[in-house]
Image (cartoon, rainbow, N blue to C red):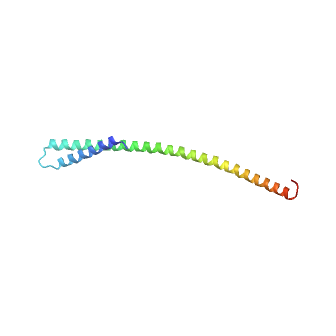
């Protein structure tokens, strides 16, 4: 996550708390009440903007990581297919050699070799 934006979000939250505390004070003039209300709205909007930005950044990072993981999965699948092919070739070779050994063994037993 973006530590700069997180820190700013924390500061905005602290400022919102301070404004809300000030709005609860007795004896405020109408101008002061309006200024605090405007400040509160501005801070809420700023908070939403920062959260939206953080969310969009997180989504972009997750999409990028997901694509990278998908690429690795494709590579692993391809390697597995290559290994399966190699395994099949080795099994057939092993069976052919075993068959040849049987033929040679039989030929030796019957005196052909």
User: 51 or 11: nearer the eye?
Assistant: 11
User: Closest to the observer: 66 or 84?
Assistant: 84
Residue 57 screen position, x and y as percent: 40, 42
- Number of marks drawn: 0
Image coords of residue 91 (percent x, y): 71, 52
Q: Residue at 15%, 42% (x, y): give it.
A: 32
Please tell me in which quadrant of the rendered image residue 3 appears: top left
**Rendered residue at 81%/57% (across/down):** 105
Quarter occupied by the N terminus: top left
The answer to whether one can see residue 37 in this image is: yes
Look at the image and tell me whether residue 49 can be seen: no
Q: Give residue 43's position: percent from left, percent from top.
A: 26, 43
Closest to the observer: 54 or 84? 84
Q: Position of residue 101 (x, y in %)?
A: 79, 54
Image point (54%, 45%), residue name:
72
Residue found 73% across the figure and 50% down from its top: 93
Res 5 → quadrant: top left
Q: Is residue 56 left or right of residue 33?
A: right
Q: Is residue 39 left or right of residue 29?
A: right
Furthest-bottom residue in this view:
109
Residue farthest along the left direction in this orientation: 27
């Amino acid at each position: 996550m973006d530590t700069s934006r997180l820190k700013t979000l924390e500061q905005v939250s602290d400022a919102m708390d301070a404004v809300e505390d000030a709005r609860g004070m007795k004896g405020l003039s109408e101008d002061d009440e309006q200024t605090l209300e405007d400040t509160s709205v501005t801070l809420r909007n700023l908070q939403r903007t920062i959260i939206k930005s953080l969310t969009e950044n997180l989504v972009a990072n997750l999409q990028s990581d997901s694509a990278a993981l998908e690429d690795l999965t494709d590579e692993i699948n391809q390697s597995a297919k290559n290994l399966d092919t190699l395994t099949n070739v080795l099994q057939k070779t092993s069976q052919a050699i075993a068959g040849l050994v049987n033929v040679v063994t039989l030929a030796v037993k019957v005196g052909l070799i």
